[in-house]
Image (cartoon, helix red, strand yellow):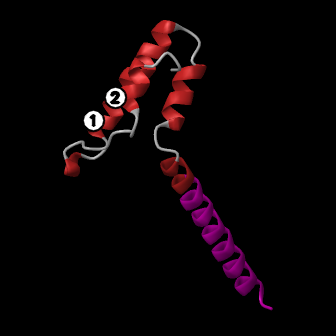
Amino acid sequence: MPPWLATAFGTTTAFFSGAIEVILLLFLLLATGDLFARKLIRITPGRDDKAEARKIIDDVAENASPAAGGAWRPSCWSSCRTSARC
């Protein structure tokens, strides 16, 4: 096999395996809904840090999809904000 062909196949394989990995991780992150956000807030150390993390998540949620009018919201975010678990 010529070296240029081996390089082309190796590069193509690395590209597609990386793309599949990113797509899989994105799917799993989206499938968890607001669980990631709740756990992120739960592990932040201080009360002020938790409030800042909530503000950042709210800002991202408002600006995540300008085409959709910022309609993206984690499914249980309102219950998480009032819950003592977060």
Q: Position of residue 52 (x, y in %)?
A: 42, 16
User: In the shown orientation, is residue 60 left or right of residue 67?
Assistant: right
Residues shaded magenta: 1-25
**Residue 33 magenta-highlighted:** no
As shown in the figure, which amino acid type bears the numbered disc 1?
A: Glu
User: In the shown orientation, is residue 23 left or right of residue 60?
Assistant: right
- Mark 1 = which residue? 62
As shown in the figure, which amino acid type bears the numbered disc 2?
A: Asp
Say few, some or many: other residues with alpha carbon within 10 Å of mark 1 (under 14 / 14 to 19 / 20 or more): some
Residue 70 in the image: above or below residue 54: below
For this rendering, which residue is in front, 20 or 75?
75
> Spatial distance from mark 2 to mark 1, Cα to Cα?
6 Å
The image quarter in which residue 62 lies: top left
**Residue 14 magenta-highlighted:** yes
Residue 66 in the image: above or below residue 3: above
For this rendering, which residue is in front, 74 or 58?
74
Main secondary structure type of the part rendered in magenta? helix
